Image: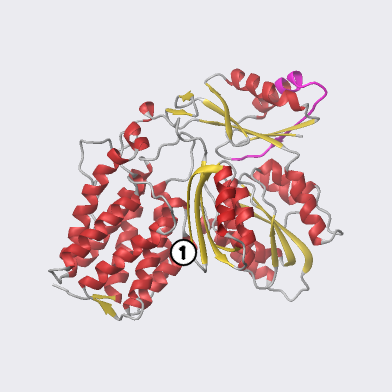
Amino acid sequence: MEDKLTGSMFRQMVLSAAAAIEQERQHINDLNVFPVPDGDTGTNMSLTLGSGAQELRNDNDERLDSVAAKTAGALLRGARGNSGVILSLLFRGMSRSFKGKEAADAKEVAAALTDGVTAAYSAVMKPAEGTILTVSRLAAEAAVKYAEANTEILPMFETVYETAKIALADTVNLNPVLKKANVVDSGGMGYCWIIYGMICALKGEALVSGTPAAEGATQSRADFSQFETGDIRFSYCTEVIIRIQNEKDPLVLRDFASRMGDSLVMAADDELIKLHVHVNDPGAIMTEAITYGYLEKVKVENMKLQHNQMIFATDSAAAEVEEPRKKYGIVAVCAGEGMEEVFRQLGADAVVTGGQTMNPSTEDIMKAVEAAHAETVFVLPNNKNIIMAAQQCVDLTENEEVVVIPSKTVPQGIAALLTYDETVEKDELTETMTQALGGIQTAQITYAARDSDFDGHTILAGEYLCLLESSLLCNSRDLEDVKTALIQALAPSSPALVTVYYGSDVTEEDANALAEALGQGLEDCEISVINGGQPVYYYMISAE
């Protein structure tokens, strides 16, 4: 048996692990516990590790440190969601441990696994147990214990795998949310599949589908009818890693984040601030965080990466023509042909396909920024989960300046673009467009994908869900109930203009019926109806 881990072995292990996650990502997704369609743990981990696999697929490097560094760098750039960020940190810590090593023995590999866990834990001040952190920590401890008396690499990873499975089975007992849902942790499940894939590579065997955790004690998918989220007050788990560029006290950032949400975790040294917090407004956290330096890590999801790469590869090639750059450019993120047409008619130079369930990566947005061919490019993310990915572009551009207008919804982005004036200086234009965001109320009507109990609302699969800003306004199987609740919520602000953007699953007749109801319920209000063609949301409604 091998007693040294080489670069070529590690490369095959990463490729096999990526294949394992891709194969089982829906199984991992089924463990998630939120009723609205959204990015999932399995998808996020698959896309993140897939970035590493893509980097290594045509690589022939034999040095372990070099292969590990390439993997960590690719995962860092391609991290999607919280689980993807943690996964990238595990590989980042391992890469640092392998630095200077052409190959590594069992003790060195065990130390690298431990350093990976340390890097992941360093992102939080009070890590929650019953997560991928717990599973990876116990697995690394088992590796260290094994290496004290043994030297073979394969049996060590088999020991890591068996320990990880036991730790995964216990996550349901450590986390109250998992206990209610009667499932194990999805991120921990993903970690087990990663180790399983690595073992298959070491054995030279094909992957076999199955469940790495013991069956019986828990369900293979969440029991949402039993799930309650009374303790979860904030909707968005936000992670930011900042490369410090000034003398501002990190404790001030911690105090700011503590006022915005809960589950706050933060670590800081002379170079980095690592922050995790649950909030309803991640854009505010990002805006504050950027004042300390530049963002090194963001929360990103992507469901149409190849599509956008093809579009913007063409746009970028066209932009190579030797022409002077114009003063300003506009990049907007949205989904739906109608929505794209609205932004283009208002002056957007490039539209990135994305939104709920398909958050574009930083690379996608960067390609659009380059295609705009302007000295200064304003980016409208139009979704809370995309703001941080857009902000990453600020420090990645070479030929243009990027200004992110932190629009959290598509209607906010449209409102900002309506104030766009290319004759105004950049700072004044930035302020004007940002101020426009505050004059819009956004309601969104979608459906519940699963049964749940969310924020005190009992939700059944198939019900209409009406979200006002980031809060659940109402849920019902009867759309008339939703209309009534929406009118009651909007009436106190006496909006002068309401625009109804209807989605791909809605007929024009139904959209007009909703508009008529809103017009009757809101006095002295002008109603407009536009075919947005957006997925996920039946309606996006702006009130101003």
Residue 263, image x and y in percent? 47, 44
Question: Depth check: 230 or 512 in front?
Answer: 230
Residue 235, image x and y in percent? 52, 39
The answer to whether 9 appears left or right of 306 in the picture is left
Q: Residue at x 43, y 53 (%)?
A: 125
On the rendered image, what quadrant is the N terminus found in? bottom left
The answer to whether 229 appears left or right of 63 in the picture is right
Q: Amino acid at mark 1?
A: Leu
Indicate yes or no whether the magenta region holds residue 309: no
- Which range of residues does the magenta coloring cover? 517-534
Indicate yes or no whether the magenta region holds residue 530: yes
The residue under label 1 is 76
Question: Depth check: 54 or 385 in front?
Answer: 385
Q: Residue at x 43, y 45 (%)?
A: 40
10 relative to 175, above or below: below
The answer to whether 80 appears left or right of 412 in the picture is left
Question: Which residue extends farthest right?
Answer: 423
Q: Residue at x 15, y 70 (%)?
A: 152
125 relative to 455, above or below: below
526 relative to 95, above or below: above
| Residue 47 visible in image | no
Residue 335, image x and y in percent? 61, 46
Q: Residue at x 32, y 34 (%)?
A: 179
